[in-house]
Image: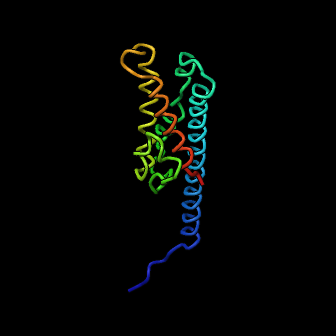
Amino acid sequence: MATPSIDLSEVLKQIDEAIEQLRAHQRQARINCNVLVEELKLNRRLCQLYFDYNGDLDEIVPRLSRIIFDEVLGSGFNLKSLKRRKIVRRKQFREFNAATWQSKPTPKLLRNTYDKITELVTFYPVAHPVKINPRLRMSNINEKLEMLIKTIDCD
């Protein structure tokens, strides 16, 4: 039986193209991760303005953002690529209300945090202070943001 002829240069070219596509995908994933972390930091700074400087919720709440999160998800970014391990147990997290999130998957905490931001932005103007406690909501969001910022590693 004759061995089929293989164009080795064509096979190597296809391998090179596949490797380049993989590298491009990895670069884009790293960029998406870094941009997402910057949005988390921005939201955390807004929370800090409220707690550290008695900021006005009427000005702060509408500025909480999920734009990058939505764009990154829309681009097909896999949240599981942020970090394969669970939320790291850290001494400073034990005092937080968000401590229940320790040892849970990072993507789950990320989605929950952005859901809480959306709820606060949506309901604060119409339900404050009757249906929600905005200070408690801000506190919980702030703690989750801190956990995420300290846990997510884009490298």
Q: Nearer the viewer, residue 23 or 110?
A: 110
Residue 50: x and y in percent read 58, 25
Residue in view at x 57 percent, y 60 percent: 17
Question: Is the residue 136 above or below the residue 148 in the image?
Answer: above
As drawn, the residue found furthest toward the top would be 126
Q: Name the residue: 51% across, 44% down.
A: 147
Residue 15 vs residue 132: left or right? Answer: right
> Is 122 left, or right, of 142 in this rendering?
left
Residue in the foreground of this view, choosing between 74 and 60:
60
Residue at screen point 56% across, 37% down:
40
- Residue farthest to the bottom, as pictured: 1
On the image, the x and y values in percent for residue 85 come to: 46, 57
Q: Which residue is located at x 50 percent, y 36 percent?
A: 69
Residue found at the far front of this picture: 95
Give residue 92's position: percent from left, percent from top. Answer: 53, 48
- Determine whether, in the image, residue 64 is placed left or right of residue 2: right
